[in-house]
Amino acid sequence: MELEIYEAFQAAGIPNAHAKSAVEAINKAIDQRYSLHSKQLATQGDVEKVRADVEKLRAQMAEMEARIIKWNVGAMFAAIGIFATLSKILA
């Protein structure tokens, strides 16, 4: 791309020194814009890291769900036991 721009400037009658400095200025501006946008873009590695983190979180959530179910079932049996004991005592 540099060469095409340089040749276009030369074809327009711009001296070599000015054409070179203009092409360099354009390249700097492009590099600055790219560096600004590159901070906002995700790479394939970033996406894979997020996917791995999501999979870990899903596994942890499944484990927590199983624990919650176990505790709820246990609490229900304990409540039934307490209710049965109280009903026998009070009857």
Image (cartoon, rainbow, N blue to C red):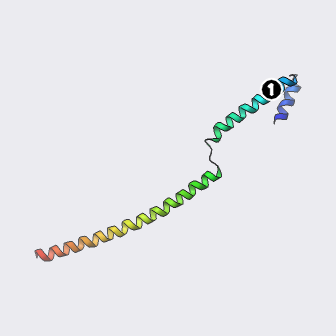
Query: With 36 as the anchor, is 23 left or right in this view?
Result: right
What is the residue that sits farthest to the left in this orientation? 91
Q: Is residue 83 above or below residue 27?
A: below
| Amino acid at dot 1 | Ser
Q: Quadrant of residue 74?
A: bottom left
Q: Residue 52 at what x, y percent from top left? A: 56, 58
Vertical relation: 70 (above or below) 14 = below
Q: Quadrant of residue 3?
A: top right
Query: Residue 65: x percent and y percent?
Result: 41, 64
Q: Secondary structure at mark 1?
A: helix
- Residue 53: give x, y in percent of width and height: 54, 57
Query: Where in the figure is residue 2, as x and y percent of width and height?
Result: 82, 34
Residue located at (45% from left, 65% from top):
62
Please report the residue visible at 64 percent of the width from the left and 36 percent of the height from the top: 36
Q: Quadrant of the C terminus?
A: bottom left
Report the number of numbered marks.
Answer: 1
On screen, residue 86 above or below 41: below
Q: Residue at x 83, y 26 (%)?
A: 19
What residue do we see at 63% from left, 53% from top? 45
Left or right relative to 24: residue 85: left
Which quadrant does the N terminus fall into?
top right
Q: Residues within 10 Å of mark 1 (few under 14, many from 20)?
A: few
Q: What residue is disc 1 on?
A: 21
Q: Residue 24 falls in which quadrant of the image?
A: top right
